[in-house]
Image (tube, rainbow, N blue to C red):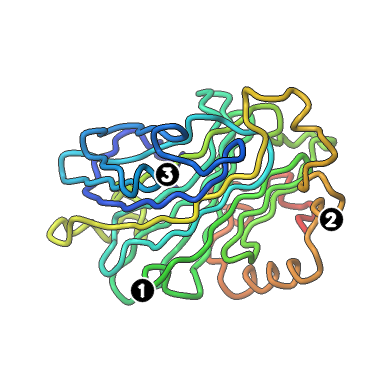
């Protein structure tokens, strides 16, 4: 996972606290944290809630925090309701992403919610890694206050396209154009991850706004976590099973209503697109010229 300036997320030194409520069906049963998720670091800061159906991550200036699914998935849809850090959240990043955990050849699909000074719009950055190549950032200013209430954020990933959604409104679409030599993540299963961390060297106004540790601890809240996908390891024919709902022809492109909403987001709320950044890409990346609707 990288920020716009290309820094790898290696050091996670955040002051944070989350409460995570999980509502996912895995193998026909409700999920519990012990059975279906794992702490990725700072396990001494994690407390289960409601019999394992929720967790609380308590973080201070000594540590960052994060968790991940125990299993990986190949295709499907993952979503969660998130209530982001309120008030002065400058320098913080709340991330929800999928990752193949394969180092230099990794595939990854990122939501990164970039903190702000009070009164400024909240920015969400998306990024896509395919076969180890990323640097495909787009940024959108959200049209609501994501810290005032829960909103649903989703990633739909099929053999044909990837859709990043906010309350069922597409904010990013990436289609499979492998036939034109453009890499697309489709061979490696990915796990589901979430983190809250400090990145004040780039996250808010390019690093001009620094984190105010006097405002710590920072809080982000999650609930209604849901995965509909093919677990790996699992049935070998699952990813290509035509009975999977996401294999249907209706999900191979945007519906007219989705396309209209997507164009509205791009016209009114997109503030950065790597495709138009000539300082980084004097020659436009080839996928940018293709129809992503």
Which sits earlier in the primary sequence, circle 1 or circle 3? 1
The residue nearer to you, when weighing 14 against 194, is 194
For disc 3, the neighbor class at 10 Å (few under 14, some 14 to 19, many from 20) is some
Question: x%, y% of residue 272?
Answer: 54, 61
Q: Which residue is mark 3?
A: 194
Would residue 4 be seen by someone viewing this image from the given angle? no
The quarter of the displayed image where residue 257 is located = bottom right
Residue at figure coordinates x 44%, y 59% from the top left: 82
Question: Would you say 251 lies left or right of 219 here?
Answer: right
1 vs 2, front mark: 2
Which sits earlier in the primary sequence, circle 1 or circle 2? 1
Residue at figure coordinates x 61%, y 33% from the top left: 73
Question: x%, y% of residue 53?
Answer: 40, 46
SS of the residue at dot 1?
loop
**Split into 4 quadrants, where in the image is the C terminus?**
bottom right
Question: x%, y% of residue 283?
Answer: 67, 46
The residue nearer to you, when weighing 6 against 87, is 87
Q: Which mark is residue 250?
A: 2
Number of labels in the image equals 3
The quarter of the displayed image where residue 179 is located = top right
Distance between mark 1 and mark 2 Cα atoms: 38 Å
Most extreme residue toward the left is 214
Q: Which residue is mark 1?
A: 120
SS of the residue at dot 3?
strand
Q: Is residue 67 above or below residue 175?
A: above
For disc 2, the neighbor class at 10 Å (few under 14, some 14 to 19, many from 20) is few
Distance between mark 3 and mark 2 Cα atoms: 30 Å
Residue at figure coordinates x 66%, y 25% from the top left: 234
Distance between mark 1 and mark 3 Cα atoms: 24 Å
Which sits earlier in the primary sequence, circle 3 or circle 2? 3
- Mark 3 in CB contact with mark 2 (< 8 angstroms): no
């Amino acid at each position: 996972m990288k920020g716009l300036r290309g820094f790898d997320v290696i050091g996670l030194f955040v002051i944070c606290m989350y409460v995570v409520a999980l509502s996912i069906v895995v193998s026909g049963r409700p999920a519990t944290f012990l059975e279906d998720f794992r702490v990725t670091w700072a396990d001494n800061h994690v407390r289960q809630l409601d019999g394992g159906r929720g967790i609380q991550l308590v973080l201070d200036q000594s540590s960052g925090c994060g968790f991940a699914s125990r299993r990986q998935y190949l295709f499907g849809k993952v979503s969660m309701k998130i209530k982001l850090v309120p008030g002065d959240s400058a320098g913080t990043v709340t991330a929800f992403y999928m990752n193949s955990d394969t180092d230099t050849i990794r595939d990854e699909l990122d939501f990164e919610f970039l903190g702000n000074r009070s009164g400024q719009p909240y920015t969400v950055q998306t990024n896509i890694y395919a076969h180890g190549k990323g640097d495909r950032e787009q940024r959108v200013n959200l049209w609501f206050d994501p810290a005032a209430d829960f909103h649903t954020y989703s990633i739909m990933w099929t053999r044909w396209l990837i859709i990043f959604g906010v309350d069922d409104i597409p904010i990013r679409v990436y289609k499979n154009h492998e036939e034109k030599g453009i890499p697309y993540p489709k061979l490696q299963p990915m796990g589901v991850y979430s983190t809250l961390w400090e990145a004040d060297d780039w996250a808010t106004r390019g690093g001009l706004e620094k984190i105010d540790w006097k405002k710590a601890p920072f809080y982000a809240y999650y609930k209604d976590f849901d995965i509909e996908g093919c677990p790996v390891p699992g049935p070998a024919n699952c990813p290509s099973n035509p009975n999977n709902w996401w294999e249907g022809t209706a999900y191979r492109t945007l519906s007219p209503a989705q396309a209209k909403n997507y164009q509205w987001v791009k016209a009114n709320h997109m503030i950065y697109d790597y495709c138009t950044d000539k300082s980084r890409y004097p020659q436009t990346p080839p996928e940018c010229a293709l129809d992503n609707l």
